[in-house]
Image (cartoon, rainbow, N blue to C red):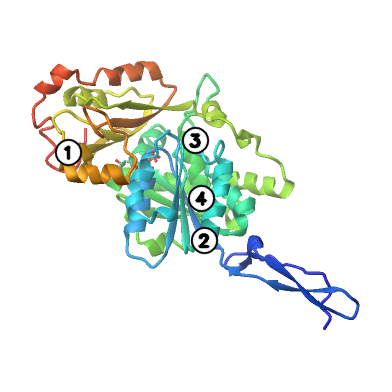
Amino acid sequence: MSLGNELSTLLLMKRGVTALNPIYLSFFTMTEHNSRDLPIYIVSCCMQEVIPVTLLSGTLGAGKTTFLKQIITCEHNYRMGVVINDVGEINVDANLIERHVESDEMIELSNGCICCSMRGDLEDSLIELATTEELDHLLIEPSGISHPKPVAKELIQGRSSAYYDLDSIITIVDARNFYDNLVDKKIGTDGNSNNKKPLPNQMIDGIEFCDTILINKKDLVNQIELTNVTETIENIQSKAEIKVTEFGDVEPKEVINTGRFDPEDVANSPVWKQVLHEKETGAEDTRNSDQGNHQHLSDEYSIDSFVFQCHQPMDPKRLATTLKSLPDEILRIKGRVHVAGIKDYALNLSVSGNHAYLDVSGRWIASLPQARQNNYQETREIEWHETWGDRETKIVIIGQDMDINSFKQTLENCVCSSTDYEQVSADPFPQTEGEFINF
Ligand SMILES: Nc1nc2c(ncn2[C@@H]2O[C@H](COP(=O)(O)OP(=O)(O)OP(=O)(O)O)[C@@H](O)[C@H]2O)c(=O)[nH]1
């Protein structure tokens, strides 16, 4: 038998073709030698399917997490993995999703953007997921201020690209926000004196850089506005499949495993031209090469974030007044609040655009019978305050050119002192009949 000692491994990286996963290759040297005294190698390899990936994109609060939750809770036969990135130090989106997926199938990447400072973490996490879990599909939700381009690039040509196949890039558009910023004000009104990119540019970048667009929040625009939004988007991106949604309601089969991502097709979009050019020439995208900080955000959009945290309850009236009159620089707030008068329930707070929502997130552990509290404390690591237990306000505030100290002070002013806490009525938000408080 003569096999020779040269082994060639062919890695087929095309869509739908099984890839020979390099780390699964194992070589055994046999004791038997052929006539030319060359060792005979037997290659044993595990064939591993590449995992199709849906990459989400969309500005802050557009509805990415809502869509993700909708997709993973729908009936389907896929074993879904999820990667969720949040720019804040607490991953609010991951907290909302974690109840719906196996913990091994979800990776949270917090306190940075996977397109820049956390690119290495993204790469490691993608490889770990692919090699430890048998996934049928992966959904990636970058933070609302990430550029999807570097993430796509990682999937196309990065270290993890051997395991994955970019199936589709879905951009979610907040119809209300888009209309107010780009239709009503007309595209191109970006006259800004300090060389910072106006935020609407981020919306356009996202629309150009995708194959599927979900025009979400259709309930917040009228039919004429929706038509205007759709036509404007078609003028920016003529190739993408466009769907109109409310709370991300779309059939999984319309958006998952569509194989819509096609580099040839998207080559005509200006942003994609850039990616392909970089791929062909090997030119580095210096804008995103900064691994250590958020320079791309501060340079382009001046976006910053901070976490506000306190155990003492918030005064509902002062909180409501603050939420109704937020400074324009505040783009997004999300997290849990502890409100005086609602001592048993944590509320989810979500602010995007001109809309603030508060809905019941679940019971505080401190409100449960002692035996259940003990059970929770034995099985989880819970930060426990001697007076308030786990009751706590923990919110992420994201803004553009915001005065962090001043807004921190505004929030501090909403916190109850121990005396006014006692005076808050048992029904602090009388209008909370339904699930949402929409200011
Ligand atoms: N009225 C309305 N609200 C929506 C719709 N979709 C989502 N929302 C609300 O909009 C807010 C933001 O939604 P998310 O899904 O958290 O948005 P996101 O894009 O994940 O936000 P970031 O992660 O901060 O970028 C939440 O309060 C949602 O409940 C919709 O179709 N209509």
Residue on which the image places disc 4:
210
Disc 2 marks a residue whose amino acid type is Pro
Q: Which mark is residue 367?
A: 1
Disc 3 marks a residue whose amino acid type is Gly
User: Which is more foreground, mark 1 or mark 3?
Assistant: 1
Q: Going from the N terminus, do you reach mark 2 or mark 3 first?
A: 2
Above or below, 217 against 366 in this view is below
Ligand 1 in which quarter: top left
Res 346 → quadrant? top left
Q: Secondary structure at mark 1?
A: helix
Give me the residue at 60% from left, 36% from top: 288
Q: Nearer the viewer, residue 150 or 237?
A: 150
Measure how far apart labels 1 and 3 are at the Cα level.
33 Å
- Residue 200 appears at what percent x and percent y? 45, 34
Horizontally, is 291 left or right of 176 in the view? right
Mark 4 neighbour density, 10 Å: few (under 14) some (14–19) many (20 or more): many
Residue on which the image places disc 2:
52
- Residue 43 appears at what percent x and percent y? 71, 72
Measure how far apart labels 2 and 1 are at the Cα level.
43 Å
Measure how far apart labels 4 and 3 are at the Cα level.
23 Å
Horizontally, is 296 left or right of 67 in the view? right
Q: Is mark 3 within 8 Å of ligand 1?
A: no
Measure how far apart labels 1 and 4 are at the Cα level.
46 Å
Q: Nearer the viewer, residue 216 or 24?
A: 24
User: Which is more foreground, mark 1 or mark 4?
Assistant: 1
Disc 1 marks a residue whose amino acid type is Ser
Give me the residue at 34% from left, 20% from top: 408
